[in-house]
Amino acid sequence: MKIGFIGLGNMGAPMARNLAAAGHEVRGFDIAAPVPGGVVPAPSAAGAAEDAEVVITMLPNGDILRAVAGEVIPAMKKGAVFLDCSTVDVESARAVAGQAAEAGLLAMDAPVSGGVGGAQAGTLTFMAGGPAEAFEIVKPLFDVMGQKAVHCGAAGAGQAAKICNNMILGATMIATCEAFALADRLGLDRQKMYDVVSTSSGQSWSMNVYCPAPGVGPQSPADNDYRPGFAAELMLKDLRLARQAAETSGARTPMGAEAARVYEEFVERAGGRGRDFSAILPWLAGEFGNEG
Ligand code: NAD
């Protein structure tokens, strides 16, 4: 397939490289990052989009997505697919999809989970929103870049699934870290706490797969001095998107709002930026010096 790829950062570069390695003709553009091996450099975003059957964007936020879409959509040929894999607000995803449809294009929002490691290994999970016809066209590309793709519904449904999942993740990670910090104070050994909770009703992905306590449970960023992994500021971004979506849709999400507030404090005032999102545990346990 002829593919235009716009946004070649930490995630976009390995995704584009994997598509090129699988034999697709990929033309790439980024305002700052270098074009990875196997990808043909394009002079502009519109230049990457001309002639492409699928244009993939992997950009920082909804405002940038809207700006790039405004430039790229008029350059695309009718019937082509505009595939946004960035994590953005649901409203931007729907606005861009509407604009693409008006121009005679197919549009999908397909944010990912799996992080930079998943992008490099081609094991991402895609959550897709948009017409079934578009999903069928881009499915072979999802198979190259990832190991699972779920068609969640109409435009915006991929972003909705992503922020709902990450709202659960943020809240359960905080709850898990709080429980370890409380266990410490109560003199309960962290390993014993893990042994009980990981096989009891308090279990979760945060406890069982990504345990925030070093030396306990399977290997996780806690065992690597809390280097990300999934950086706390990216979790904050997703929790803010969830909060914004809750406000505009009128959903009641008190725990999600509190999780956003906790990560805001952690990232912006407590030295959490650049650390894994599970570093909430050493912060709550008072191991951040006087910052905690
Ligand atoms: P990044 O900042 O490394 O990459 C974004 C790239 O977009 C940068 O290279 C930047 O130069 C480029 N860019 C910005 N404006 C542009 C424009 N107008 N035209 C062309 N290129 C432009 O970010 P990332 O970590 O690759 O994340 C990309 C998206 O994926 C984000 O929406 C993020 O939330 C999401 N995401 C990231 C992770 C992760 O672990 N990094 C995991 C899941 C989802």
Image (tube, rainbow, N blue to C red):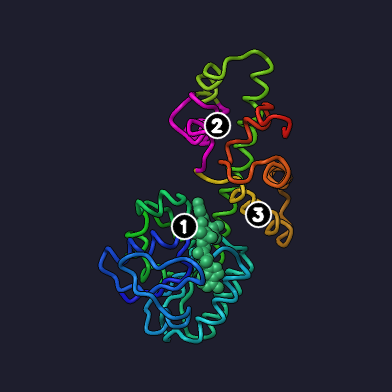
- Horizontal and vertical percent for residue 187? 64, 13
- Horizontal and vertical percent for residue 136? 36, 69
Q: Which mark is residue 10?
A: 1
Query: Pointer 2: residues within 10 angstroms few (<14), some, or many (20+)?
Result: many
Q: Say which element carries label 3.
A: helix
Q: Quadrant of residue 88?
A: bottom right
| Mark 1 and mark 2: Cα distance apart in space | 24 Å
Q: Say which element carries label 2.
A: loop
| Of labels 2 and 3, the one closer to you | 2
In the rendered view, tell whether residue 102 sits above or below residue 59: below
Q: Which mark is residue 260?
A: none
Chain-order first, disc 1 or disc 3: 1
| Of labels 1 and 2, the one closer to you | 1
| Mark 2 and mark 3: Cα distance apart in space | 23 Å
Chain-order first, disc 2 or disc 3: 2
- Is the C-beta separation of discs 2 and 3 under 8 Å? no
Residue where numbered disc 3 is placed: 242
Residue occupying the point 58% across, 45% down: 274
Residue occupying the point 58% across, 58% down: 160
Q: Quadrant of residue 29?
A: bottom left
Q: Quadrant of the N terminus?
A: bottom left
Identified by mark 2, the residue type is Pro
Q: Nearer the viewer, residue 200 or 224?
A: 224
- Is the C-beta separation of discs 1 and 2 under 8 Å? no
Residue occupying the point 60% across, 64% down: 61
Q: Nearer the viewer, residue 246 or 207?
A: 207
Q: Is residue 153 visible?
A: no
Residue where numbered disc 2 is placed: 212
